[in-house]
Amino acid sequence: MINGKPDEIDLKLLGILQEDASMDLARLAKLVNRSPSPVHERLKRLRQEGYVKAQVALLDRALVGQPVLVIVHVKLKRQTQALLRDFEQIAVDMAEVQFCLHVSGGWDFILHVTAATPQDYYVFLMERICAQANVEHVESSFVMKECKSYGPLILPKAVFTEKNAAG
């Protein structure tokens, strides 16, 4: 890092990790033309600084028995700060909810919900979402095909050098 910003090697490491976070340290070090010990320290620092939030395994929903994916738009009756926070916490705590987004516009939240069958989703919707006293309206869209999921973030192309970091 230079002046608290990732340098070229850090950015290469982050790019590689986005593609394969399970890569062993020796292979990772070789790809960035460094020895394992300094790469280990860089990774530790990138995690501590919050650049790497978590390393997880992305599972195949169908193979683990959750082939149904539903995008759920939720409109609340009232949108006070406390009520928004309450619904957010309820949604985040539901295992079926894979993503919870608080959004602007005509909806308050967009949820990505998984289920084993459409009927299981219906039960979840009625018993867990619509049963919330502050929910006014819900719209569900069943995903027919996932075209892209979990794409890598675009990382800066600029190389941070002593000269341009100071300027």
Image (cartoon, rainbow, N blue to C red):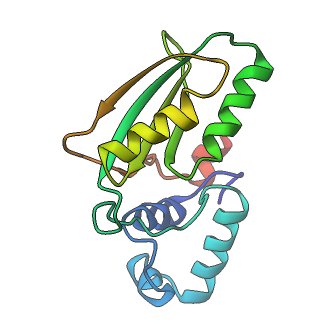
Q: Residue at x 50, y 11 (%)?
A: 105
Tally of marks: 0
Image vertical order of residue 46 relative to residue 31, above or below = above
Q: Nearer the viewer, residue 141 or 58?
A: 141
Q: Nearer the viewer, residue 61 or 2?
A: 61
Q: Nearer the viewer, residue 78 or 60?
A: 78
User: Horizontal and vertical percent for residue 96?
Assistant: 50, 49
User: Horizontal and vertical percent for residue 35?
Assistant: 53, 88
Q: Residue at x 31, y 43 (%)?
A: 118
Q: Residue at x 38, y 66 (%)?
A: 59
Q: Give the side of residue 121 with respect to residue 55, left or right.
A: left
Q: Which of the 4 quarters of the picture holds residue 31?
A: bottom left
Q: Give the side of residue 164 with respect to residue 33, left or right.
A: right
User: Horizontal and vertical percent for residue 39?
Assistant: 57, 79
Q: Give the side of residue 49 with respect to residue 107, left or right.
A: right
Residue 154 visible from this viewpoint: no
User: Horizontal and vertical percent for residue 27?
Assistant: 41, 86
Image vertical order of residue 59 relative to residue 37, above or below = above
Image vertical order of residue 56 relative to residue 96, above or below = below
Q: Give the side of residue 73 with respect to residue 41, left or right.
A: left
Q: Nearer the viewer, residue 155 or 167?
A: 155
Image quarter of the N terminus: bottom right
Residue 127 visible from this viewpoint: yes
Image quarter of the C terminus: top right
